[in-house]
Image (tube, rainbow, N blue to C red):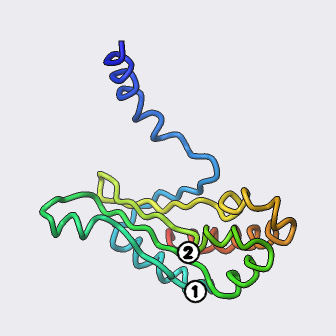
Amino acid sequence: MRVLWALLCCLTLPAWAEEPLSGWAVYPTDKSYEDLVADTKAAVKENGLIVVTQAGPTKAAAARGIIIPGNLVIGAFNNDYAVRVLETSVRAMIEAPIRFYITENEDGTATLSYKTPSFVFAPYVYEGGEPLSDIASELDTKFQAVAESAVK
């Protein structure tokens, strides 16, 4: 019975994977992975944020002889937002920087996605109140502008 259940789950997994996740913004593009990475970094800077972190398994895997599709997480934030978030909720800063996720598709194109700042900070609104909600809304607008600039 467990084997049947596992098989059933595996057969339905691709359909689940294509469902949009709650709180996520997803931007499929015709751009290559390398171009979308470069354009996202440029758009972050153009929109007053800073690339704070970058992490991905692609290059490390290649160094081990394993080839996987391009995959990179770019954390973006700035000190003004950090100070303002801390004024509302110290716990909420665990979520900074907020991340963009760039993935290479099988057809050579790439997709830019991210959890919206409002979604990321939602668990902390009980503590940060309306000021934190306002910051998250500002960041929603800024992250959308970064994404729209990066994918065009």
Measured as percent of width and height from the top left, residue 71 is found at 35, 63
- The residue sitting at 52% across, 59% down in the picture is 27
Q: Give neighbour class at mark 2: few <14, some 14-19, many 20+ (Cα, 10 Å).
A: some
| Residue at the spot of label 1 | 46
Front position among marks 2 and 1: 1
Q: Which residue is mark 2?
A: 149
The alpha-carbon separation of the residues under discs 2 and 1 comes to 9 Å
Q: Nearer the viewer, residue 107 or 78?
A: 78
Name the kind of residue labelled 2 in the image. Ser
Does 123 sit left or right of 94 as displayed?
right
Q: Is residue 96 left or right of residue 107?
A: right
Task: Name the residue: 51% across, 82% down.
Answer: 52
Per the image, label 1 sits on a secondary structure element best described as helix
Work out which residue is located at the far front of the displayed protein and give it: 90
Using residue 42 as the reference point, say whether residue 34 is left or right of it.
left
Label disc, if present, on residue 114 of the rendered structure: none
**Residue 83 screen position, x and y as percent:** 72, 84
Instruction: Tell me where residue 33 sits by quadrant.
Output: bottom left
Mark 1 Cα-neighbour bin, 10 Å: few <14, some 14–19, many ≥20: few
Identify which amino acid the numbered label 1 is placed on.
Glu
Q: Nearer the viewer, residue 10 or 47?
A: 10
**Residue closer to the observer: 7 or 108:** 7
Label tally: 2
Q: Where does residue 48 sit, x and y in percent of width and height?
A: 63, 86
